[in-house]
Image (cartoon, rainbow, N blue to C red):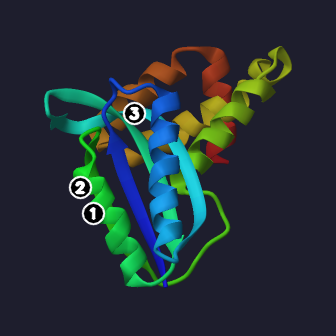
């Protein structure tokens, strides 16, 4: 059976110490006849709400393969660790080799910033077409106001006519 455990480490703990803490938890799981299938460090991220007067935390994901005793050993170690603010363990129905959603979110953002060149920023048609689709999704009053504003410039008017055609 596969289990996914996400835990949040106190932001006052350094990243190196967070990795060391994660290594200790992995050893506990392995001693209890479990196996870590996936391990991801999501970085220091803001919390949805304050926990112990902290507004950020180091997020770590562990996907474990093993019997429930291995998960119980992991959770008991997490409960005893004062540096861990919160944790959540869920059972997975299937294991995916793909990176987690947060790991995927980091990858496309890094690629898009590297691909931005002066040649791609000069092409203004896609941006205007995207604005035209946003106008359609708004209320009729807001759409009419924005349509009047975009038709005020001759360049935007010609591209908005192309977008509607």
- Looking at the picture, tell me which residue is in the foreground, 100 or 72: 72
Report the residue marked by disc 2: 79
Q: For the residues marked 1 and 2, what is the alpha-carbon distance in whole angstroms?
A: 5 Å
Can you tell which of label 3 and label 1 is closer to the viewer? 1
Report the residue marked by disc 1: 76
Q: For the residue labelled by badge 2, is the local secondary structure a helix, a strand or a loop?
A: helix
Residue 164 seen by the camera: yes
Residue at left 75%, top 20%? 121
Examine the rendered structure and indicate whether residue 102 appears above or below residue 117: below
**Disc 1 and disc 2 in contact, CB within 8 angstroms:** yes
Q: Most extreme residue toward the front, as rendered? A: 31
Label annotation for residue 165: none
Q: Position of residue 34 (x, y in %)?
A: 52, 74
Would residue 135 appear left or right of 48 to someone viewing this image?
A: right
* Picture quadrant of residue 98: bottom right
Q: Position of residue 74 (x, y in %)?
A: 37, 64
Label 2 CA crowd tier, 10 Å (few <14, some 14–19, many 20+): few
Report the residue marked by disc 3: 45
Can you tell which of label 3 and label 2 is closer to the viewer? 2
* Picture quadrant of residue 59: top left
Q: For the residues marked 3 and 2, what is the alpha-carbon distance in whole angstroms?
A: 21 Å
Mark 3 or 1, nearer chain start: 3
Residue 160 seen by the camera: no
Residue at left 23%, top 55%? 79
Would residue 15 appear left or right of 52 to someone viewing this image?
A: right
């Amino acid at each position: 059976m596969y289990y996914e455990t996400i835990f949040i480490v106190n932001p006052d703990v350094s990243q190196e110490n967070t990795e060391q803490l994660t290594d200790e938890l992995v050893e506990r799981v392995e001693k209890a006849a479990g196996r870590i299938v996936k391990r991801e460090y999501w970085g220091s991220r803001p919390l949805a709400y304050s926990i112990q007067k902290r507004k950020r935390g180091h997020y770590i994901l562990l996907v474990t393969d093993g019997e429930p005793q291995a998960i119980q050993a992991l959770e008991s170690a997490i409960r005893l660790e004062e540096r861990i603010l919160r944790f959540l363990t869920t059972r997975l129905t299937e294991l995916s080799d793909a990176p987690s959603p947060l790991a995927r979110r980091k990858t496309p953002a890094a690629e898009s910033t590297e691909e931005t060149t002066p040649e791609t920023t000069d092409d203004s048609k896609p941006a205007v077409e995207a604005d035209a689709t946003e106008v359609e999704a708004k209320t009729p009053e807001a759409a009419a106001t924005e349509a009047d504003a975009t038709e005020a410039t001759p360049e935007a008017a010609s591209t908005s006519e192309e977008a509607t055609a």
